[in-house]
Image: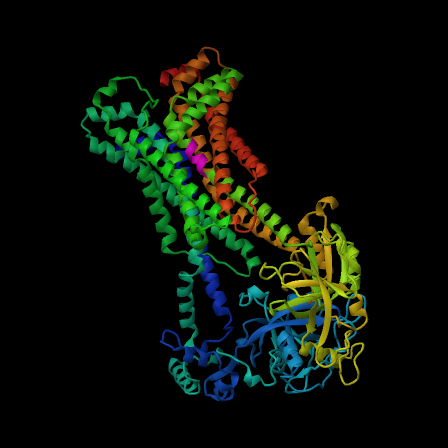
Amino acid sequence: MFSITLKLMKKSARMLISAGIAILIGTAFIAATFLFGNAMNDALAAQNTAQLGGANYVISPDSGKDLTDKDQDYIYTRTVNDFQLDRIRATEGVKDARASYAGSVTVTRGNKHASSYVITTAAKRTLLPVTITQGDQPADSNEIALTKSVADQLGVKVGDRVTVNSQAAQYAGKTGDSAGNTGDAGDESAQNADGTSSHDGDSDAASGASVSSDGANTADSGMTVRVVGLTDDPNGAYAYYGGASVLSDNVITAMAGSNDFGNLPVYLVYLDIDDASDTAAASTVKQVSTLLPKHFSVQSRAALVEESVKSMSSGETSITTIFLLSFGILAMLVAALVIANTFQVLVAQRRRTLALLRTIGANKSQLYVSVLFEAGVLGLIASALGVGLGIGLMAALCQSGLMKATGMTMRLVLSGPVFTVPMAFGIIMTVIASLGSARSATAVTPLEALRPIELTDTRRAGVVRAVISVLLIVAGVALCAFSVWQMSENIAGRDSMADKQYPLVLLAAIIGCALIFLGLVLSATFWLPVLMRGVGAMVALAGPSAKVAHANIQKNPRRVAATGAALLIGVTLVSTIATGAASAKQTMNEALTTRYSVDMIAAGTDMTGKQASEAAKVKGVQRGIYAPTRMMTMKDADGKSLSVLVVGVDGVDALRKVVRSDLSGVTIDGDSVLMPKYSAATGKDIPLDKSVTFTAGAAEAQADAANGPSGNDANGSAENGNGQSGGTQTLTLKPRKVDYRRIASNYAAVAFVDASHFTNGGIKADGHIMLMRIDAEGAGVALNDVFTNVQNVFSASAGVTVTGPVAERTQWETMINGMMALLVGLIAVAVLIALVGVANTLSLSVIERTRESATLRAIGMTRGQLRRSLAVEALLLSLVSGVVGVVLGTLFGWLGSYMVFSLYGDTVFPFEWATNGVVLGVAALAALLASVAPARRAVKTPPVEALAEA
């Protein structure tokens, strides 16, 4: 019987091709998913151990032991001195040892700034996790090996001098944690684009600088060091930071805000041990272990690699693999619909053959097994080809180097699941999809060998299917309605389950949508043929070809429903994602607009007037004002302290140019301050007395006194505009409250005062702000371009940040667009398989209607008319299913948007015309292309020959 089955398969090979393609695509996707997970695990494991450099052993905290909180505190408070590096290096068999300490610094040359991640140096290059591509690693004091990207950004080469600085070094200098003020720091202090100092004329070289143990200055202006080499990060040890620079011990000590390298906190030490002999290496490890603090041990590199692989197998890459695998399973489910269609027609076409087999002794079970065996063989061959395609695609991806942009070098890693899972899934899904056809084969009687073949399936859908479908839809609608009701109650401020159990309410909505969709797919045999019949009746008026197509599409409602359902799945998911993404962008845009009163804000300590002038000229920036600022504190009427950014402006008229708020009847003079009604931090009303007092903190005032601002005497006695003296600056004004919303997100409030308070010495400015009104649409430019261009203007100033709703909107849209592109790309696999199903249905229709097509040709239908009838049939299948999918996906997208984004503002319910139009257009075009091959087959066979074959 098996040999007969194989011969039947060979005879029906053309019919099986489309089903095989569907299986091939699905299994290729699953195989590629496992390969991607393997490559990610491999790359991340290599990346995790890349920080070891050439070390073959590591001193690290003990793992797998029960450690108390006290033990943990002990471990993470160890310093370099605790590891006795000198004694470890002197131990026989130890070639070198490097304590691992890292941080971030700002590197400056002239008016150019760049951020760099920095690590400690080593006596030998082999222990460095980065490669020295030019020059040498830092060995003496005041040396740095820069990453090539930072060197290119600053225009620096080996032998040049740069200035490095860090927040820890600045803090140590201001608080006096380190020694006094000597050295030559500031030789290359940052200058603004217009040639003025970036600190309003302050002399940074005398501003309480800290000094490292060798006397090098680390003031606000930084520490001057010599570039002795350039580094590269070929193994991605610091890919997240774009590589790492290497600092000499004294420089990294100063950047950590310390004055002794031995006091730096470390908990990892990398060792290069002579392991030519296992016995000698074990002896060296034992000697080193006696020098370590408690709870630390020496571990081999091989053991660390093994641990890394284990951690990766249950970490983020598994989540990624599961996420991608779900789309592969979706693709296989859609493929199952295509397979089921194929085997239904195969069994129907072979009814006479099957009946003849029954007459010569084949029993029902043999016919049943024969169909399943055929499905298994098809699944095996197609799955094997799919695995091969998946391996080929992944190998091409790894060779292309596209993943290098993420900082990871991926390689092809084969494993058992790459072969077993896709093949098992492909075979099982194919066999399951053929079960219904196998049952149909057992119903064939020997007498049917003498009857004419009737391929059209006239069976009616079962009552059980109808009942289950209705129950699923009703349950889904009930869950969705409950979720919407709970969310509306929550938004209205009434008691709601969504207030305390929001995840459950959201889950109910998701399950509700899933049940509705499942119910509609199961009941597609009832409503989809009826819908197509109605649309087809109108299309039939277009001519004879359309009339024939309308008649043909009604002949096999079950197959039409299965094909339509396959396409419905993909289109619904794409439309849901597109609608949700559009709603997210529009809802968040409106929420951001209502929460900010200024479109875009640039603020920082080293902003210059020249930069502000250039920013004002950026296309899309309608208006802008440049103003001095000071961070101050105040107390509200309840005695609560608030951090306030005080901004000096030239009257309220200047403010009206950029602030989107009602400022009518408001004035700003020397005795008043304009305050927001609500706190940006809490959203609650700010209670104010008849007057408020703003205070600049003692630490800031002392720094200002040391810098000698206007109005200060030589001893640093600060005289402010209110006649106050001592360690603080105070300013008492009458508040006027206006409902303008968040200006700068880092402060509870932004207060506007007359600019004269800054010019007369009443307030010492510690930064500047630029408030901008944006009209990108009026200027004919993209919002993202405006944001990028403004950022570029301020790129020379490391301390300037650009924020505001425009910035957040740009970042939000970029994130949503990226996620949407990823999801739509993944779902496209299922859509592709569904379109293969359309081609499959047409091909099967041509085969089963051979006699009918011949008759039509014989009575005068031209080849062109026959082609057009198949094209119309394909368009009806794809567009009707596609339109239903778009409507359903839009409704699901609206529900999801309401459930998620109503928490942030009034939800917008858009209809994504562009994306939905593209999806329907692609479906229509693909359907037309899918009709080409079946049409050629239909018109190629002469009518007489076709009638004879039938």
Question: What type of secondary structure mainly makes up the magenta span?
Answer: helix
Was residue 567 drawn as part of the magenta stretch in this picture? yes
Quarter of the figure with residue 520: top left
Q: Nearer the viewer, residue 932 or 163?
A: 163
Left or right, 226 with respect to 58, comes to right
Vertical side of 496 occupied by 158: above or below? below
Residue at x 72%, y 74% (from the top left corner): 730
Residue at x 70%, y 75% (from the top left corner): 163
Residue at x 39%, y 78% (from the top left corner): 68
Q: How many marks?
A: 0
Was residue 124 drawn as part of the magenta stretch in this picture? no
Vertical side of 276 occupied by 46: above or below? above
Left or right, 692 with respect to 387, comes to right
Q: Nearer the viewer, residue 405 or 554?
A: 554
Is residue 14 among what the camera can see? no
Left or right, 334 with respect to 816, comes to left
Percent position (x, y) of residue 735? 71, 63
Residue at x 70%, y 74% (from the top left corner): 162
Q: Which residues are magenta?
A: 564-569
Percent position (x, y) of residue 855? 42, 13
Vertical side of 548 occupied by 820: above or below? below
Vertical side of 27 occupied by 682: above or below? below
Looking at the picture, the colour scheme in use is rainbow
